Image (spheres, helix red, strand yellow):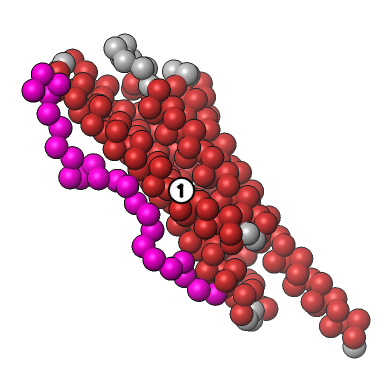
Amino acid sequence: MADVAGHIVKSYEQELARLRSLITEMGGMVESQVAMASEAVLGRDETVAARVVEADPKVDALEQEVQQFVIRLLALRQPMAQDLRFIVASLKITSDLERIGDYAANVAKRSLVLHQFSLPFTLTGLANMARLVQEHLKEVIDAVGNNDAEAAVEVWRSDEGVDQIYNALFRELITYMMEDPRSITPCTHLLFIAKNLERIGDHATNVAETLYYAVKGETLAGVRPKGDTSAYAVVRPASE
């Protein structure tokens, strides 16, 4: 009888490990999508952009696989305490990862339009923002794989840096548009790209919050640090 019980416990632990593996696999896929989307914009690479879009259905399929796996675990295992929190949290985490994949695909699609224009300015700010977002995404995916609540807190706290870069980009691009009407179309696409990257950062912090709750059984105290003030920005032409 003891052998049967031990087998059941081992099987259950393997299932939990499988669930975590599926989440990290999905995380790796969207991490690759974001990296390629950034490369497509900054390197003006249409082939890479197409690969980002093509990868999106695979991310969606993996999310559905996780959902089915979770339903099976809940029905057959009746988990409790931290196991229950992690299993339920996995649904929210994969939902956030799926949205990150969508945003990466949007960036890639807009990059294809952007390639049609000659830009009279550098994309240094956008490159810095893309790099920071990718770092945060990697850190939170690693935190999920390691069940590391403290690493999740660090990602949660660092989102403000992404917002600050976005605010600066917002003002810069609006200024270009005001000074030269010919830049309105490419700058509009760049604004959407920057906003998509900012939203990817937001979803990475969502994952961090969810992971923290799954591990600790409590929500992160305080209000998430946010620095996006673009909704209140007042931009004036440089000549004023």
**Image position, residue 184 (x, y; %):** 20, 22
Residues in magenta, as a range = 217-240
Residue 97 in the image: above or below residue 168: below
Determine the image quadrant of residue 173: top left
Type of residue at label 1?
Ser
Query: Foreground: 143 or 60?
Result: 143
**Image position, residue 238 (x, y; %):** 15, 21
Name which residue lies at 72% across and 66% down. 15
**Image position, residue 47 (x, y; %):** 51, 21
Name which residue lies at 8% across and 23% down. 240
Determine the image quadrant of residue 22: bottom right
**Image position, residue 226 (x, y; %):** 34, 51
Q: Is residue 78 magenta?
A: no
Name which residue lies at 38% across and 21% down. 123
Residue that label 1 marks: 158
Secondary structure of residue under mark 1 = helix
**Badge 1: how crowded within 10 Å, few (<14), some, or many (20+)?**
some
Residue 176 in the image: above or below residue 68: above
Secondary structure mostly taken by the magenta-highlighted segment of the chain: loop
